[in-house]
């Protein structure tokens, strides 16, 4: 409830917190509610459990829906939120109780603004206006055809909103968001069609990426993910009472660590950390992952450095690279001895990937 | 800021060897079941312990006996995996804080708890809230600024070095060290702690190429950005690059230790903290805090086996750290303490224990008046126990985090007048400037 559906406080449609008569925030639930809702989850076990209370049989058990054992489900009625309840079912029916609880949460008026704010933060900007949140939350509440919770419609509403599309807004000093390290990595890989000749049976271990950026998919340090929606880094963001969630994993170690990861991906042409599926597996031939930079190399060969930088600007920076940044990159590339064509290309790519113009998506 | 920097540069570094103090905060994230860390052994109390804890009870014969100087007839034992801690306790270099937890104001017992008159910490039993409150000591709200950060806001000017933060983290960003003006400096336990930008290699002309690249990086980061996100990421990266060289150079000059450290990252973190302490004069630090997290204590099941392993890791790390501090002749200048979200329910859920409130913590250092159990260790019976607020065995804390932290802040050099700036609720537990200390385990 805290993290994935309604949050800690009652919200207005625009994501701001409701206030009681004394001007205080209104908690969405209390410890008694937690106790009641905990009863709903009693009696569930792994779908492949031989007996109730035995552990997971395999890692894959985590990927399959749990099953209910009604003998271990708390009997009786359970209070849900907003005055609703799961009835006293006889016989006991944990699956039906769970359905009631999920519906109860799904219908909670907080879900729309709660999800809208978080999804906008992931997809567009760290500090959406209340009006933007309200428009997206309204789409959650009703997709226009009387359907609540149509995720496709919500994503469309987020991306097609004037606040996401208006180019004039991009230059607003409080506009934008820090791209998270994992997104930077996948963006580079996808932008230049990273591929290996032999792509059968291996995994990208990413130990170095994880260590240097403090981010690895499906391995956040706690249920609160890598960063929280209302994190405020010291400096102008906090001074203006704005949020910058992704800065929570940006520190003296990870900022340099990220630059060194980019060094590996570019100059060292080392985009992936090979890992076999089974212990002691020999690395098969042809599993080196390469970026396809043929077009870019041709530009360097033809001495078209400005075009090269424009191409990185277009593909990686969405055309938001400033003239100043372009000049810094160009001057550096031109200073490199003319025979080092590949180095020139990688230098332009490296500098683009660590430039504030790229790191902040606007 | 600039003025401060100029002042700092104008003054020669303090002779930090004579005036150095460090606080080391070890966060046991997830909620350590600390009523198995410190266990009463006097027969009636041990009987209450086993009656309440049932299958989570430790056998009396397994417990490591200790002889506290201040508990009169009450006997205690500590967890069997903590022989080093037992020894540090017996040598007077370690004490326990009993039944300590987050409080806004004192709560005498169950009736006051239920009365609605007393303010309660937000989000009791919630990991995110309690772990935050332990680091802010302001449990009436969800504050982003920690008491170590507030400490640095006030005291950072006393360090000759204004380029690197007073607050050093081995676990990244954290609430404890987040200040209004001061940001933690995050290091790793590898190499010299701070990694520089990879030098250029493999293309020939390495010197030239590196100069070109570093100049371009510098130009990008030193540029003025109007956008608040761009200016934040560029200055953070620039400051990190500038600090790294100075920091890593100083750590590289630290002579190898005789003390050996275990392989676990908590021990390696302690080893790196010790290196930073050893480099304090070269770096120009007279005050520092360190922060490190050891997570995975949310033992809703398998609590006994997990604790045996994990408390053993804590035991080794504390023991090794104390040993190296003695080797560096600074054991009395460094005070190390544990914090954790909460203790766990006294009763078993059949496999482990669940989220509770007041619990027990460790404080270690040459300056600590050790071999004591500070605060009041509670009666562990469930019934007719005014401190117990749940059928599961949840203790209202009898000592506040404020009192604990105030004692260390005063020792660290915060003036009694400034105490309330660091610990806003302290007035509810202690009168700053009074003749007696908040708890009484450090010379202040």
Image: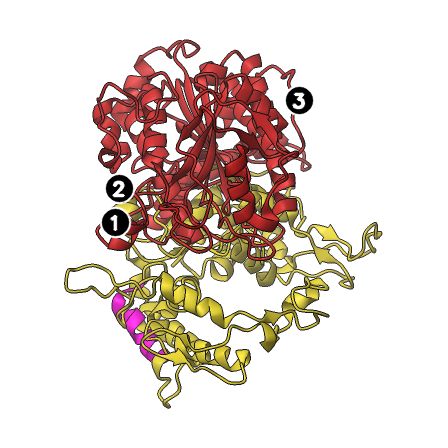
Chain colours: A yellow, B red
- Residue A345: give x, y in percent of width and height: 59, 49
The image quarter in which residue B37 lies: top right
Q: Residue at x 62, y 45 (%)?
A: B304
User: Label 3 is found on which chain of the structure?
Assistant: B
Q: Is residue A118 visible?
A: yes
Question: How far apart are the alpha carbons under marks 2 and 3?
Answer: 44 Å
- Earlier in the chain: of badge 3 and badge 1, it is 1
Disc 1 crowd, CA 10 A, few/some/many (<14, 14-19, 20+): some
In the rendered image of this protein, does residue A24 appear above or below residue B345? Answer: below
Above/below status of B111 relative to B17: below
Toward the viewer: B74 or B149? B74
Chain at numbered mark 2: B
Element under disc 2: loop
Q: Which residue is mark 3?
A: B260
Circle 2 or circle 3, nearest the eye: 2
Disc nearer the start of the sequence (2/3): 2
Q: Residues in magenta?
A: A128-140
Residue annotated with mark 1: B119
The residue under label 2 is B105
Provide residue A95's location: percent of width, then percent of height.
Answer: 54, 80
Q: Nearer the viewer, residue B425 or A254?
A: B425
Contact? badges 2 and 1 (CB < 8 Å): yes
| Label 3: element kind | loop
Above/below status of A204 relative to A354: below
């Amino acid at each position: 409830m805290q993290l994935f559906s309604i949050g800690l406080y009652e919200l207005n449609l625009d994501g701001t917190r409701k206030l009681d008569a004394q001007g205080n925030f209104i908690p969405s639930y209390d410890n008694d509610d937690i106790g009641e809702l905990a009863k709903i989850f009693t009696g569930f076990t792994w779908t492949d459990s031989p007996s109730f209370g035995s552990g997971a049989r395999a890692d894959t058990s985590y990927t399959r829906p749990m099953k209910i054992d009604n003998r271990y489900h708390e009997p009786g009625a359970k209070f849900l939120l907003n005055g609703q309840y799961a009835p006293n079912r006889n016989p006991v029916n944990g699956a039906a109780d769970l359905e009631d609880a999920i519906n109860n949460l799904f219908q909670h008026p907080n879900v729309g603004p709660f999800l809208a704010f978080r999804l906008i933060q992931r997809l567009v900007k760290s500090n959406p206006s209340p009006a933007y949140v309200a428009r997206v939350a309204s789409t959650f509440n009703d997709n226009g055809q009387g359907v609540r919770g149509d995720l496709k419609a919500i994503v469309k509403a987020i991306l097609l909103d004037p606040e996401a599309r208006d180019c004039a807004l991009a230059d607003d000093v409080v506009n934008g968001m820090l791209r998270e390290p994992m997104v930077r990595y996948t963006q580079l890989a996808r932008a230049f069609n990273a591929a290996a000749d032999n792509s059968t049976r291996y995994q990208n271990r990413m130990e170095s990426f994880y260590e240097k950026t403090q981010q690895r998919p499906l391995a956040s340090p706690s249920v609160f993910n890598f960063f929280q929606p209302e994190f405020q880094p010291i400096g102008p963001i906090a001074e203006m009472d704005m949020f910058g969630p992704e800065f929570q994993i940006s520190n003296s170690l990870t900022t340099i660590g990220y630059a060194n990861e980019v060094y590996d991906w570019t100059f060292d042409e080392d985009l992936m950390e090979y890992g076999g599926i089974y212990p002691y597996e020999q690395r098969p031939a042809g599993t080196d992952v390469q970026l396809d930079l043929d077009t870019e190399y041709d530009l360097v060969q033809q001495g078209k450095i400005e075009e090269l930088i424009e191409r990185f600007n277009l593909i990686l920076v969405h055309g938001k690279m400033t003239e100043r940044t372009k000049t810094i990159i160009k001057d550096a590339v031109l200073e490199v001895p003319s025979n080092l064509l590949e180095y020139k290309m990688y230098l332009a790519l490296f500098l683009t990937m660590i430039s504030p113009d790229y790191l902040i998506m606007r | 800021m600039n003025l401060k920097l100029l002042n700092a540069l104008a003054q020669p570094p303090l002779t930090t060897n004579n005036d150095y103090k460090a606080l080391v905060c070890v966060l046991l994230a997830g909620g350590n079941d600390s009523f198995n860390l410190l266990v009463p052994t006097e027969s009636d109390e041990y009987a209450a312990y086993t009656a309440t804890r049932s299958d989570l009870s430790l056998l009396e014969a397994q417990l490591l006996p200790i002889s506290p100087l201040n508990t009169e007839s009450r006997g205690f034992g500590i967890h069997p995996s903590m022989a080093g801690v037992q020894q540090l306790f017996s040598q007077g270099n370690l004490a326990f804080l009993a039944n300590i937890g987050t409080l806004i104001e004192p709560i005498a017992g169950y009736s006051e708890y239920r009365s609605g008159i007393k303010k309660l910490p937000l989000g009791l039993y919630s990991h995110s809230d309690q772990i935050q409150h332990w680091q802010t000591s302001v449990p009436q709200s969800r504050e982003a600024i920690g008491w170590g950060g507030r400490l640095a806001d006030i005291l950072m000017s006393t360090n000759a070095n204004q380029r690197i933060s007073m607050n050093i983290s081995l676990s990244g960003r954290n609430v404890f060290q987040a200040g209004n003006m001061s940001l933690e400096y995050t290091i790793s336990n590898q190499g010299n702690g701070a990694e520089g930008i990879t030098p250029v290699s493999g293309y020939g002309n390495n010197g030239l190429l590196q100069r070109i690249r570093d100049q371009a990086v510098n130009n990008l980061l030193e540029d003025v950005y109007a956008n608040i996100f761009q200016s934040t990421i560029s200055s953070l990266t620039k400051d990190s690059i500038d600090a790294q060289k100075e920091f890593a150079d100083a750590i590289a000059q630290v002579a190898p230790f005789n003390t050996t450290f275990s392989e676990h990252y908590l021990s390696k973190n302690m080893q790196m903290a010790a290196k930073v302490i050893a480099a304090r004069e070269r770096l120009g630090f007279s005050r520092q805090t360190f922060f490190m997290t050891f997570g995975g204590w949310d033992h809703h099941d398998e609590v006994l086996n997990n604790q045996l392993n994990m408390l053993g890791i804590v035991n080794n790390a504390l023991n090794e750290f104390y040993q190296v501090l003695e080797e560096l002749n600074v054991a009395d200048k460094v005070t190390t303490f544990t914090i954790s979200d909460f203790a766990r329910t006294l009763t078993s859920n059949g496999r482990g224990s669940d989220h509770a409130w007041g619990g027990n913590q460790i404080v270690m250092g040459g300056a600590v008046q050790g071999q004591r159990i500070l605060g009041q260790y509670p009666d562990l019976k469930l019934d007719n126990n005014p401190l117990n607020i749940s059928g599961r065995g949840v203790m209202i804390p009898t000592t506040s985090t404020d009192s604990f932290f105030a004692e260390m802040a005063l020792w660290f050099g915060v003036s009694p007048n400034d105490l309330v700036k660091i610990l806003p609720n302290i007035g509810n537990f202690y009168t700053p400037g009074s003749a007696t200390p908040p708890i009484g385990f450090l010379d202040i």
